[in-house]
Image (cartoon, grey):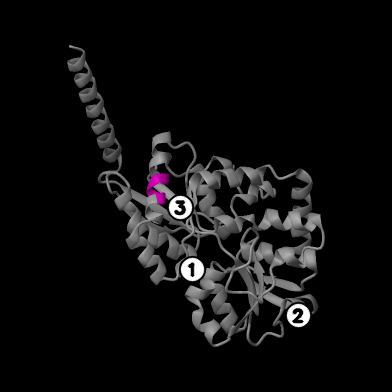
Amino acid sequence: MRASFSIAIAAVLGWQAVAHAQDRAEFYRGRTIQLLIAYTSGGNYDLHARVLARHISKHIPGNPTVVPQNFVGAAGLRLANFLYNVAPKDGTTIGILARGSPTEPVLGNTAAQFDARRYTWIGSVADEVSVCVSWHTSKVKTFEDMLSTPFVVGGQGPSSDANLFASLLRSVFGARTQIVSGYPGTNEISLAMERGEVEGRCGWAWGSVKVSRGEWLASKKINVILQIALQRAPDLPSVPLVMDLARNDPERKMLQLMFSRQQMAWPFAAPPDLPAERIALLRAAFDATMKDPDYLVEAKQRGLEVNPMPGAAMQALVQDLYDTPPSVVAATKAAIADGMK
């Protein structure tokens, strides 16, 4: 009798597990996931999103169609605000945000209408080293030249890496950067360098430089002046790292606050308040995609580095940013404001 009861219980539990799996698959079956991209086509944000879109569906129960779409504006803040305040909170809209988005509210940007701690962080494909580069005709060839020679760089908007990094270098180290802002994305700044509108840019992902402008490196059309990250890229051994230039602990803490974004360089997120099960499902699908042989082959073919940070680790990193001591935040805000004058 006891054995028959145990068998019956096991059958019920097994049926419930099957039904639960079917329910999970049923939500996404026949649906479309909109994958919004903070920047224009052709750059690494766009490329990372489109490669992910081609492979993640097979790891989501129900195999929804994933449609990438560029959602450009305000150096990434348009998408960050939309995803937080407007997008449906059911897992049918996700996005690749500007990596600097989490620090915007911390630094007091009133245009950032969100609390980055509440996003559903799904995962980041890799960390990243950004660089400052100059066009080959510029008089600025090295970081030392930036300290003595006016250097006109392209920017996107006040909250973009290109603007913030150039401003911070000017304020903290006395770099003579002059920012021409308003370019919508990487491609447009690259064209501006070719046309002679600007001499270079700061805050350009090194991986993106290698993928999209490898011929410029080979033909020495650009000079790589400075690495902007917490750790240097192995293939730039002779290019100085910004962290090594810090002259004291306060400077070092400011740089850590600003450049911690490089640890989650290609961040995918969904709106806040998703059902817990859907959060787990999206994170699991992202993690599985990062190990998918077909995805890894395509990423390698396109020159994309894959060194993922899981969603839970991103959540912890964002919380750390919000826990930055007020004195460090105030000093960083002052340095940025001074550098933008």
Q: Amino acid under label 1?
A: Gly
Position of 112 relative to 218 (above/below): above
Provide the residue designation for mark 2.
145
Q: Residue furthest top?
A: 1
Disc 1 target residue: 43
Which residue carries the number 3 mark?
A: 95
Give x and y (percent) for residue 187.
51, 73
Q: Residues within 10 Å of mark 3 (few under 14, many from 20)?
A: many
Q: Residue at x 51, y 70 (%)?
A: 208
The reply to whether the C-beta atoms of the residues labelled 1 and 2 are less than 8 Å apart is no
What stretch of residues is rendered in magenta?
Answer: 283-287
- Numbered disc in front, either 1 or 2: 2
User: Could you classify mark 1 by the number of other residues whose Cα lies within 10 Å: few (under 14), some (14-19), or many (20 or more)?
Assistant: some
Q: Secondary structure at mark 1?
A: loop
From the viewer's perspective, tell me whether residue 90 is left or right of residue 321: left
Q: Earlier in the sequence, mark 1 or mark 2?
A: 1
28 horizontally vs 100: left or right: left
Work out whether residue 90 can be spotted.
Answer: no
